[in-house]
């Protein structure tokens, strides 16, 4: 079965650079969630989209922005990177946003900021 | 205080042992309770999902939710070395379904 695809899997950037993370949800899933997991930490919700509209916003820095495109893939754009942005970034997808549906997680993108 | 508290362990048990993992929470709006398993450097994988209070069993895994105590548990029977992973509790509720996670418990099952 198709799973959530994230690219790139690994990314190394310098401070103050920008990064773009991509997420391709499971086919027919219309909801995407982004989570950030720091070293030894639990995943923290950043932002979510349903049918290409932002549906909720969590602890996402103003330096970050995201969107969901017409094919339902999503991109997380991160600017002015800081050392503290080094983390594993997960994307999860589900079908529908207004009732509970299982969130399927991708393998994550490991971002290292030097 | 975090909304979801989970003892990070680590927890080490012999093969065949019964494992008990627990989380407490403070947000009364949580209605959906999940347990995820996460292997090192991998994405979380859903193990069990429970709506509101009650028990749910799936093979060697049993999830329990006690909303009156704001306490959830995951039991693993006949634990296997392949069960070695980090177990994260997660919850959601209210008007959206973002997940709030516990810190995760690192479990090692020794052969």
Image (spheres, rainbow, N blue to C red):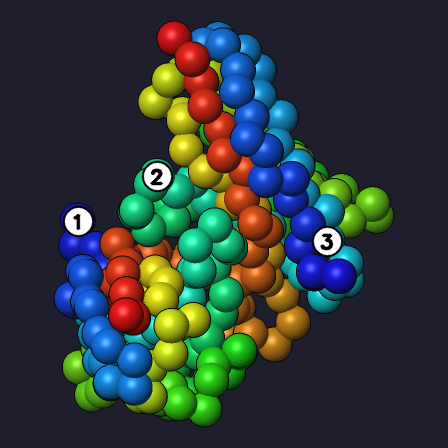
Residue that badge 1 annotates: A1
B61 or A18: which is nearer to us?
A18
- Give the residue at x 20% y 88%: A70
Residue A25 spot, x, y in % from top left:
24, 67
> Would residue A83 be seen by someone viewing this image from the given angle?
yes
The CA span between labels 1 and 3 is 34 Å
Let me know if marks 3 and 2 both belong to one chain.
Answer: yes
Badge 1 vs badge 3, beta-carbon distance below 8 Å = no
Q: Quadrant of residue B22?
A: top right
Name the side, left or right, on which B22 lies relative to B1. left
Secondary structure, mark 1, is loop
Let me know if marks 1 and 2 both belong to one chain.
Answer: no
Residue that badge 2 annotates: B39
Residue that badge 3 annotates: B25
Badge 3 vs badge 2, beta-carbon distance below 8 Å = no
The CA span between labels 3 and 2 is 24 Å
Name the side, left or right, on which A112 lies relative to B5. left
How many residues crowd mark 2 within 10 Å: few (<14), some (14–19), many (20+)? Answer: some
Q: Quadrant of residue B84?
A: top left
Badge 1 vs badge 2, beta-carbon distance below 8 Å = no
Residue A40 spot, x, y in % from top left:
47, 50
A113 or A97: which is nearer to us?
A113
Let me know if marks 1 and 3 both belong to one chain.
Answer: no
Which marked residue is nearer to the observer: mark 1 or mark 3? Answer: 3
Write down the chain letter for disc 3: B
Residue A111 spot, x, y in % from top left:
28, 66
Name the side, left or right, on which A71 lies relative to B66. left
Name the side, left or right, on which B87 lies relative to B67. left
How many residues crowd mark 3 within 10 Å: few (<14), some (14–19), many (20+)? Answer: many
A48 or B60: which is nearer to us?
A48
Q: Earlier in the sequence, mark 3 or mark 2?
A: 3
């Amino acid at each position: 079965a198709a799973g959530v695809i994230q690219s790139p899997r690994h990314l190394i950037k310098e401070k103050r650079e920008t990064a773009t993370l991509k997420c391709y949800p499971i086919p027919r899933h219309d909801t995407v969630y982004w989570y950030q997991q720091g070293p030894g930490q639990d995943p923290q919700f950043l932002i979510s989209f349903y049918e290409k509209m932002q549906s909720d916003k969590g602890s996402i820095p103003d330096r970050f922005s995201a969107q969901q495109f017409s094919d339902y893939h999503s991109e997380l754009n991160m600017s002015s990177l800081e050392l503290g942005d080094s983390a594993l970034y997960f994307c999860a997808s589900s079908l529908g946003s207004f009732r509970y549906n299982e969130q399927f997680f991708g393998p994550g993108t490991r971002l290292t900021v030097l | 205080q975090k909304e979801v508290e989970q003892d990070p362990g680590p927890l080490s048990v012999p093969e065949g042992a019964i494992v008990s993992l627990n989380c407490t929470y403070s947000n009364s709006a949580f209605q959906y309770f999940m347990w995820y398993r996460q292997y090192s450097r991998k994405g979380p994988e859903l193990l069990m999902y429970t709506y509101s209070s009650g028990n749910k069993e799936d093979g060697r895994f049993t999830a329990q939710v006690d909303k009156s105590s704001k306490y959830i548990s995951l039991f693993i029977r006949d634990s296997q070395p392949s069960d070695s992973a980090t177990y994260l509790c997660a919850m959601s509720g209210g008007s959206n379904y973002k997940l709030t996670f516990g810190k995760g418990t690192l479990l090692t099952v020794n052969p």
